[in-house]
């Protein structure tokens, strides 16, 4: 069984997220998704983020057919620990991370980069509304 992992805050689900899940799930037999806690999102993105609480973001992700299981994490260390424990065959991350330090990459079989869908970013959506 090929296990695939991806992670993010997934504050406001949009087409770019769904395309990521669709792509990631096509690479294996099960897709595991890591989800930032509310505290981590606020630390990383600043107030007033997140707009949706952890419980609600997790519920939405668990309702998406491409996703088999959702895990939460509150720091870089806890994210790396999850990936180390779960040992995914493939870690999928946005292509904007090429050449950068990808958390947990050393614990995955390989890293695949996903080309983000132009025009779809939670931050950009919120800034243009």
Image (cartoon, rainbow, N blue to C red):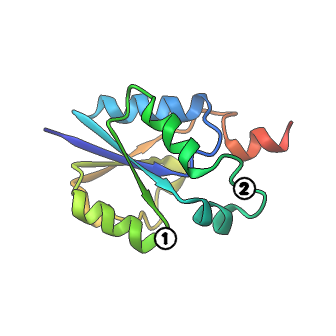
Q: Residue at 76%, 43% (x, y): give it.
A: 124
Extreme-bottom residue of the structure: 77
Left of 41 or right of it: where is 74?
left
- Indicate the position of residue 65 as horizontal and vertical percent values: 39, 25
Quadrant in the picture for the N terminus: top left
> Which residue is depicted at the point 23% across and 63% down?
85
Please give the residue where the numbered disc 2 appears in the rendered image.
Answer: 49
User: Considering only order in the chain, which callout, 1 or 2, is on the residue closer to the N terminus?
Assistant: 2
Q: Is residue 101 above or below residue 8?
A: below
In the shown orientation, is residue 32 left or right of residue 54? Answer: left
What mark, if any, has residue 5 been given in the picture? Answer: none
In the figure, 45 relative to 28: above or below? below
How many callouts does the rendering have? 2
Q: Relative to residue 83, is residue 8 depicted above or below? A: above
Residue 22 is left or right of residue 42, and the answer is left
Q: Residues within 10 Å of mark 1 (few under 14, many from 20)?
A: some
Residue at image point 57% right, 33% down? 16
Q: Residue at x 30, y 61 (%)?
A: 83
Question: As rendered, which of 112 and 17 lies closer to the eye?
Answer: 17
**Which residue is tagged 1?**
75
Up-down relation of residue 87 to residue 25 (above or below)? below
Q: Where residue 17 sits in the image (x, y, percent)?
A: 54, 35
- Which quarter of the rendered picture does the C terminus lie within? top right
Where residue 24 sits: x, y (%)? 37, 36
Left or right, 29 with reference to 13: left
- The Cα–Cα distance between marks 2 and 1, rounded to whole angstroms, is 16 Å
């Amino acid at each position: 069984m090929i296990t695939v992992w991806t992670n993010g805050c997934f504050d406001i689900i949009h087409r770019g997220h769904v395309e990521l899940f669709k792509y990631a799930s096509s690479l294996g037999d099960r897709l595991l998704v890591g989800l930032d806690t509310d505290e981590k999102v606020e630390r990383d993105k600043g107030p007033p983020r997140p707009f949706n609480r952890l419980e609600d973001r997790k519920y939405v992700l668990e309702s998406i057919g491409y996703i088999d299981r959702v895990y939460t994490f509150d720091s870089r260390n806890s994210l790396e620990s999850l990936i180390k424990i779960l040992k995914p065959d493939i870690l999928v991350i946005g292509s904007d991370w090429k050449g950068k330090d990808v958390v947990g990459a050393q614990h995955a079989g390989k890293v695949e980069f996903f080309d983000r869908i132009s025009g779809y970013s939670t931050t950009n959506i919120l800034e243009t509304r």
